Amino acid sequence: MTPKLYASAAALALMAGTAMADGHGHMKFKPGEGAFSWDSYNAWAESAPDLSGQTVTVAGPWLQPEDDVFRSVLAYFTEATGAEAIYTGSDSFEQQIVIDAEAGSAPNIAVFPQPGLAADMAARGLLSPLPASMAPWTVENYGAGQSWVDLGTYADKDGADQHYGFFYNVNVKSLVWYVPENFEDAEYEVPETMEELRALTEQIVADGETPWCIGLGSGAATGWPATDWVEDIMLRTQPADVYDAWTTNDIPFNDERVVAAIEEFGWFVGDDAKVSGGAGAVATTDFRDSPKGMFAAPAECYMHRQASFVPAFFPEGIEFGEDVDFFYFPSYEGKDLGNPVLGGGTLMAITDPSDATTALMEFFQLPLAHEVFGAQSGFLTPLKSVNPETYLNDALRGQADILVNATTFRFDGSDLMPGGVGAGSFWTGMVDFTGGKDAATVAAEIQDSWDALK
């Protein structure tokens, strides 16, 4: 997990209270009650196989409180099929799953926090492809459906592409946070396009105020918030296949399209008038402190671009919808690239197939399997059939709306790059850039570091 994922699933729950599962595998919500999608669950349960006496095991990285919440989801599978479903969470999951798979003692299903390890295990023959129906189902039922299939498709041990990964519980990075009262007082409107966001930035400066709070400080990981900015801008200025080629170095880091994205970030961060504390303070301001300027009196800034976890660093007592809100980091109206979303998420893959395993993967296609998790924790899903009313709070509902309306979804690019680049020269290069070094030079130096790894 990179420093970008400080968020626990409870980060947004801090603003609205949290319901917890009982932790004993019991159904948390009584069938038929609430806004859950009971009809589709009941229809599936009626036709589900009788798996009494069978066991299906799931292993993953979820610990308290998410592990108990997930067990409460599995309870509905057990109720429908009679099979016992056992989840085991571990803080060393990524090491343990490899050991277990190599020893022939893998769980039936593994929950991977990122696709890289799943792809490695697929190439070694340690994963089994998902049922053939799941790829077309995902395209049809997930927002940006083809993106999720692509992100879960890896080469097998013979080099042939297979669909291995089913994404379940994701997060959104393409968000801009703001204080509604500040916008109302200044008569600013939430921008719906990047052109409008740029115009708003200039308007705030013209009004003698500061539009942005930005901080890159993060100890040894200083610089990572700027990589998120550049990744979001890449998805808004170039087609997704260019973004993909950039993350694998099939196009070099100093390609003119990448340099242009860095320069676009510089448009927001390189002017003293646009950033709280001035451009020179960006690299030294801790990312955890940077959003606090929105809540100062008078406001030190009007906007803060950051992922869904950032409420964990807001002042105490901040209420979503009243004291703070967010909007989608918008796309360019003039570029016709749709509504891309940057984020991350967990994926399920089959490590030991069985009849009960196949049935459980079918269960995870039901809205209820997502709604029960989303009603208790900071869970998000791109599944379009989920009833938004079941989400724990309005913040999650708003982010889910962004997910289901996305046309493209991509993982954090720096997480997909070699560690020496994505968690090394890319970070430090962005610090150098905000310190005044030109984008072309920074990009060339990052490419040199990538070449040195080959």
Image (cartoon, rainbow, N blue to C red):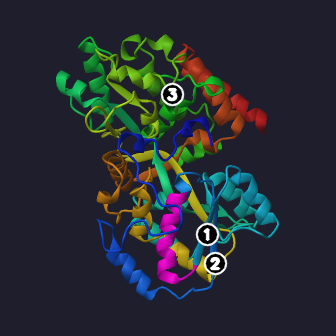
Main SS of residues in magenta: helix
- Front disc: 3 or 2: 2
Q: Amino acid at mark 2?
A: Thr
Tag 3–tag 2 contact (CB < 8 Å): no
Label 1 sits on residue: 86
Dot 2 and dot 1 residues touching (CB under 8 Å): yes
Q: Is residue 217 left or right of residue 12?
A: right
Mark 2 or 1 closer to N-term? 2
Q: How far across and down, in percent of the image, does residue 30 sit?
A: 36, 71
Q: Amino acid at mark 3?
A: Ile
Measure how far apart labels 3 and 2 are at the Cα level. 51 Å
Looking at the picture, does residue 402 appear above or below residue 131? above
Taking the image as drawn, is residue 450 in sight?
yes
Q: Which residue is mark 3?
A: 262
Residue 88: where, in percent of width, then height? 64, 61
- Residue 55's disc number: 2
Rendered image: mark on residue 203: none
Region of the chain picked out in magenta, as a range: 68-83
Task: Look at the image and say whether residue 353 sits in the magenta stretch.
Answer: no
User: Residue placed at 49% from the left, 22% from the top?
Assistant: 215
Relative to 231, does residue 69 appear above or below in the rendering?
Answer: below
Residue at 39 percent of width and 68 percent of height? 367
Q: Is residue 74 magenta?
A: yes
Circle 2 packing at 10 Å, graded few (<14), some (14-19), many (20+), is some
Q: Position of residue 324 (x, y in %)?
A: 31, 33
Label 3 to label 1: alpha-carbon separation: 46 Å
Q: Quadrant of residue 432?
A: top right
The answer to whether one can see residue 152 in this image is: no
Rendered residue at 41%/87% (across/down): 46
